[in-house]
Amino acid sequence: MSEPSSGSNPPQIASRREPEEAKPTALDLPEGELSPGMRAYLARCAEKIGFVPNVLAAYAHDDAKLSAFAAFYNGLMLAPSGLSKLEREMIAVVVSAANRCFYCVTAHGAAVRQLSGDPVLGDTLCVNWRAARLAPRHVAMLAFAEKVAVASAAIGEADRQALRDAGFADVDIWDVAAVASFFAMSNRLASATDMRPNPEYHAMAR
């Protein structure tokens, strides 16, 4: 293959820019009649992070579904736990990367960057968590979470014992499994509906 001449123009890479008003998913899901509590919840999200995450905008087609999702998510990711918030976000990213979920890898990769202050860690977990420089605790945690995502029926006592050996109590093992399972479900729903991450996520904590 010949080299381009010095005077030639570089090849242009075609791109498809999403319009700002693009729907959060490929489905036509108009916003439903939301309760005052759910409207206030969306307003708090917008105030805190500057926008309403598209996953919430998608669930907002049905008040009961949005309420159930928000309660389950907040209980898993924000409530007191033996897992730190960063550890839970790390699980979210690794499970979502295993399932090739564009929405969740992008959104939770941004959360890892924010919570860790380390964009390299965030990007590495999005691509191949085994390339990250991790403590033994986190190696055991992410190996278990990934197995939940892709081969849960193969999990046995040796897998649970590996977490105990890394310092996790049994209640923590439940939380690792619960977070990994929640995102395995969310990944499938997001991919099936072509859920798109808010553009703001891409530049957060860079």
Image (tube, rainbow, N blue to C red):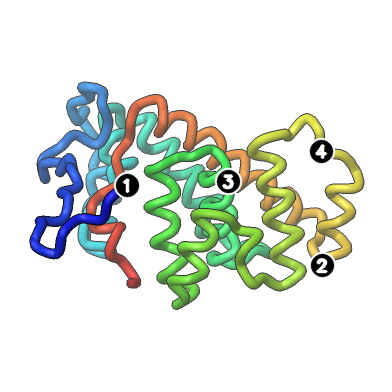
Q: Position of residue 184 (x, y in %)?
A: 56, 37
In the figure, 44 relative to 33: above or below? below
Q: Secondary structure at mark 1?
A: loop
State which tag comes first along the sequence, 1 or 2: 1
- The residue to which callout 2 is attached is 167
Q: Quadrant of residue 180?
A: top right
- The residue to which callout 1 is attached is 1
In the figure, 96 relative to 110: above or below? above
**Would you call the spot at circle 2 few (<14 residues within 10 Å), some (14-19), or many (20 or more)?**
few
* Amino acid residing under circle 1: Met
**Would you call the spot at circle 3 few (<14 residues within 10 Å), some (14-19), or many (20 or more)?**
many
**CB atoms of marks 2 and 3 within 8 Å:** no
Q: Secondary structure at mark 3?
A: helix
Most distant residue in the bottom direction: 117
State which tag comes first along the sequence, 3 or 4: 3
- The residue to which callout 3 is attached is 95
* Amino acid residing under circle 2: Gly
State which tag comes first along the sequence, 4 or 2: 4
State which tag comes first along the sequence, 1 or 4: 1
Q: CA distance from mark 2 to mark 3?
A: 21 Å
* Amino acid residing under circle 3: Val
**Residue shown at the point (67%, 70%) measured from the top left:** 134
Q: CA distance from mark 4 to mark 2?
A: 19 Å
Q: CA distance from mark 1 to mark 2?
A: 56 Å
Q: Position of residue 152 (x, y in %)?
A: 73, 34
Pair 1/4: label in front: 1
